[in-house]
Amino acid sequence: MYSKKRMAIKGVHSLLLAAGFILAANSECFAQALLQAQDGFIYVPQPDYIYVDGNVGVTEGTFEQFGALELTGNWTNLSEHDNTGFSASSTGEVKLVGAAQEIQGYASTTFPNLSLEGYDTKRLIVNSKVAHTLNLNNIELDVRGNDMWVDNSAADAITYTRGYVNTSNAPLGRLLRTVDAGVSYVYPLGGGVQYKYRPVTATAEENGVLAAQFQNYNADDDGYDRMRNIATNSNVISDKFYHVVTSINGVNSADIKIPYSSSEDGSYNGLARWTDNHWADAKYYYSGPEAGAGTDQAAHYRLQNGGAHILALTDTIATDNIFVVSGFTPNGDGKNDYFVIKGLENYKFNELKVFDRWGKLVYTTLYYKNDWAGDGLEMGAYMYVLRVVNTNGKERIIKGDVTIIR
């Protein structure tokens, strides 16, 4: 037990060291191994700080922190009663200063201020919140399918140099920000197997909470089939990445900006939104040249309702060397027995999908050879989606209806 001038630790079992010691010197507390707030609370006055060369764990104890808490290991909240770890009055800073570190446990921690330092990726294994500021510095925060929420509505509540939040290692996991109407907020999103930095900028018309994701991979991987596309004919949904912007609470209208690189990502002239189990034209959209960090274009989208907005860039390309028959008669007479698509020989790859009027997939194949006779299907109209790739690697999508006549 130390004097409050240096370090005040209150509660019978408030400080537990598993295999180490505490040394107080010059208003500092050094701990080796494990520091745990068990059922009392640890008081850290400003400008004092605790340095832990190891892990910090919370069960039902509480940190009342106004100084700094630095640790080289993991932060773990094992509370079974939603203990957030810090008192609401805390204004201190938690610094992760080691190598690969994790924020983990059963319950969500609300850090007063959180700074990612040291080196290597920091990982989020449980939903977490920052009450005041999140400083990414040069570090990647991999949310691993969990939510990181910055509750301070100041525009600069998230600071970074080359740091970013990676949501791409799981289909879930978001960066949330509490927002004020009329203020522009940056969501520094990046990562992926082949790293890209593709942030989101949002300006809401109402106070509330907005979340954003950048998924740096093909939308097909998460079940958003790029061939289920009712947008303007021949629109190609980008296979590079997609974004999700979600109104969590309060926001009904917002301007969303998604930057991209025309040289790295490709040329696009449209934006699509996944809705009602298909891609459709995103309304209230425009795009144009706009310089950014590694980007030179930006798509702007007008969010007009709550919930999740799943957005992907699109490209419209002419397909005047493809001819698809409008119907065929598979009766075995040797005439017009198959669904014929002329011009496939001009492409190095093709994929064909056919759906019934309820949207059920009834036929699919790669490298179609004009040999489908509609086996087992009733007479009627069906929708086809054809994807072709030319010798330069450029992709095209052709959609339409074909009628089986028996």
Image (spheres, rainbow, N blue to C red):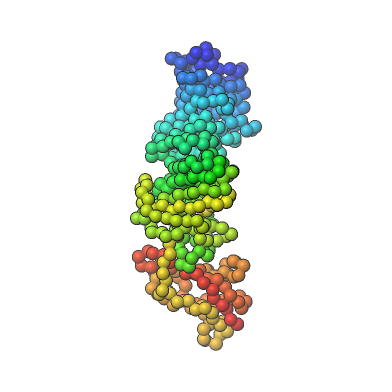
The correct choice, above or below, for 278 with respect to 158 in the image is below
The correct choice, above or below, for 396 with respect to 220 in the image is below
| Number of numbered discs overlaid on the protein picture | 0
x then y, percent, for residue 303: 53, 51
- What is the quadrant of the N terminus in the image? top right
The image quadrant that residue 393 belongs to is: bottom left
- The residue drawn where x is 50% and y is 42% is 182
**In front here: 301 or 266?**
301
x then y, percent, for residue 369: 46, 75
Left or right of 43 on screen, residue 344: left
- The residue drawn where x is 62% and y is 27% is 60
Judged from this view, the residue extending furthest toward the right is 81
x then y, percent, for residue 34: 52, 25
- The residue drawn where x is 48% and y is 76% is 324
x then y, percent, for residue 252: 57, 48
- The residue drawn where x is 46% and y is 18% is 28
- What is the quadrant of the C terminus in the image? bottom right
The correct choice, above or below, for 373 with respect to 90 in the image is below
The image quadrant that residue 76 belongs to is: top right
